[in-house]
Image (cartoon, rainbow, N blue to C red):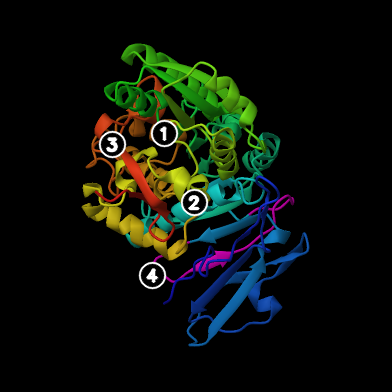
Amino acid sequence: MGRCSTYAAHRRERHEFREGLFGPQRRPPRTAHCRTPGHGARDDDQLGLRVGCGVRSHVILPDSTNNHTYWKVNMSTRNRFTALVASAVAGSLILAGCGGGTGSASSDDDTVDVLVLTPMSGPLVTLGDTAIAGLTAAAKVINEEGGILGRDVKLTFEDNRFDPMTAQNILQEALTSDDRPDMVFSGVTSTETVAIMPLLTQYKVLSMGSAASPLATDPEKYPYGFSMFPRAVDYEGAMAKFLSEKGLTKVAAIISDSETGKAAQDALTSQGEEYGVEFEFEKLDAESVDATSELSRLMRNEPQALLLEGLTSGAPMTVVLDGKDKLGWDIPTFFGMTDAVSGIQNATEEQIRGTVLQGAAFGIKGSDRQQDDDFKIFQEAVDAELPTKDYQLSNHALSYSALMVLRAGAEKADSLEAPEVAEAIESLKTDEDIPGWFQTVNPGFADDQHQGTWAPEDFEFVELGFPGYDPTSGLYLPAEN
C-alpha cells in the first residue's frame, strides 16, 4: 500500500519581504497535504471525525479499494498533529488533532510514542520545520527497518511557539495524562529546552533535542535528557584553533542574546585562552533591526576579524552584514556553527565573497562524508519531506539522529524505560553501536555532559562561494578553487 506523509508532501510557498533594513516574514496559511493510495472516500462517521478548536481530526484507515483520498488541513488553525508512520507493507495511519485541548492521541502499546515540541509558528518556524522533517524521515526509515523493539514510531507534534512557558504547559498536560510519551523531543534551541528539563526529570521521561547550552544536558541534574548538538567546547574549540592557525589573536564577536549565545561566549572565552585568541563580545537580540551601534563599539579596538555566532534566525545575520556595509567596515568575517543559513541566503554577493564558514563536515558540498550509505539514506528520506530547505541539512540531521539514538539505546537496553535507555545510550561509542549514524567519525556523549562529542575532523572550514548555500540539497557551497 502507499504511504502518506503528514508533512510537506507538497512544499508550501514562502514569501518574504523587507521593511526598511529588514522586515518580518509574511507566510501563507500552513497547509498539510496527504494523498494515500488505497484509501477510499468515506463519510464523516467512517473517518471518525471529531470537532474541536474549529478543526476536525481525521483518522484515515487503509482499505482494499483503489481510490485515492485527498485531504488537507489548514495548519494555521491548529498547533498539534499526530502521525503514525507505518511501514510500506502495513500501510499508513494518520491522525490529526488540535492542540491546547483536553484530549490527546490514544496510547498504544504497539507503538513507540514520541512527543515533539518545536516551533510551528513564530520567528523560528522554519527551524521547527527541520525538526519535523528530520523526525518524520527517521521514523519512516526506522519503521521500514522493523521499528523499535518491533514497534512502529508514532510522532505527535506540538507548537511550543518558541516560548518556554508554552512548552511547559504542553508538557505538563502530556505528562499528567494517561498517554504519557515514551520520549520527548525537547526543542530546537536551548531557550525552549532548558525550561522543560526539570519536568522531564521529575516524571522520568527520556528526552532528546538539539540544544546547544550545557545547562540542558547536565547528567547530574537531568539524567534522562540528551542533545544531539555538538558540545560548544568542541565546535568553539575548533573555531579558536582555526583562527589561531590563521595568525589571528584579536577577534570581535557578535553573538545572540540567548542561551545559545551564552554557551558560545563561555566556550570561546575558555578555548580562546588555550589557543591565544582574545575575543571581544557584543550581544544582539533576535528582534534587532540595526547593529551599527554594536559594530561601532567593536571597531574601536581594531580587531583582526569578525565572528558571527549563535544567530539562529536569519534576521540578525542580515542586520550585521548590512551594518558592516553602512559603516564601511572591511574586515575578514567568519560564520560560526550555530548561525542560520537564511542569513547567508539573504546576503549579497559582495557580503558573502571571502567569508569563511564553519560547518559539519557532511554538510559541505563535496565532502567525502556524503559517500556514506547511511548519509545517502538520510538525504533521500529528508528530500522526500522537504524538497526545498530553509535550513542547512546538518540541522535536519540533529532531529533525525535523535530517533536513531533512541532506537539503539532502547534495543540495547531491551526496554523503553527512561533509566535503562539512558544508561544504554551513555555506552554507545562507535557508529556500529548506532545503525544509521553518519554525522561524526564516532558518536558518543561526554561523561559530564549529555551532549554529542565531536572531533576536530568532524568540522570543516570553507570559504563560501556565491550563492553560499543550495536550498535543494541543503548543503553549503564552497568557493570554486
Classify mark 1: helix, strand or loop.
Answer: strand
On screen, residue 366 above or below 429: below
Classify mark 4: helix, strand or loop.
Answer: loop
Which numbered disc flags the more N-terminal residue, 2 or 1?
1
Q: Residue at x 57, y 81 (%)?
A: 69
What's the residue type where badge 4 is placed?
Ala
- Choose mark 4 or mark 3, whichever is in front: 3
Q: Residue at x 45, y 18 (%)?
A: 279
Crowdedness of circle 4 by 10 Å Cα count: few (<14), some, many (20+)?
some
* CA gap, disc 2 and disc 4: 36 Å
User: Does the magenta segment cover residue 4?
Assistant: no
What's the residue type where badge 1 is placed?
Phe
- Choose mark 2 or mark 3, whichever is in front: 2
Give the percent coordinates (x, y) of residue 62: 50, 76
- Can you identify the residue that label 1 sits on? 334
Q: Which mark is residue 458?
A: 3
> Furthest-bottom residue in view?
66
Read off the magenta span.
Answer: 85-104
- Choose mark 3 or mark 1, whichever is in front: 1
Q: Are marks 2 and 3 in contact (CB under 8 Å)?
A: no
Give the percent coordinates (x, y) of residue 143: 38, 59
Q: Quadrant of residue 384?
A: bottom left
- Can you identify the residue that label 4 sits on? 88
Which numbered disc flags the more N-terminal residue, 3 or 1?
1
Q: Nearer the viewer, residue 398 or 368?
A: 368
Which numbered disc flags the more N-terminal residue, 1 or 4?
4
User: Does the magenta segment cover residue 102?
Assistant: yes
Q: Quadrant of residue 313?
A: top right
Q: Nearer the viewer, residue 240 or 452?
A: 240
- Can you identify the residue that label 2 sits on? 345
Image quarter where the N terminus lies is bottom left
- Choose mark 1 or mark 4, whichever is in front: 1
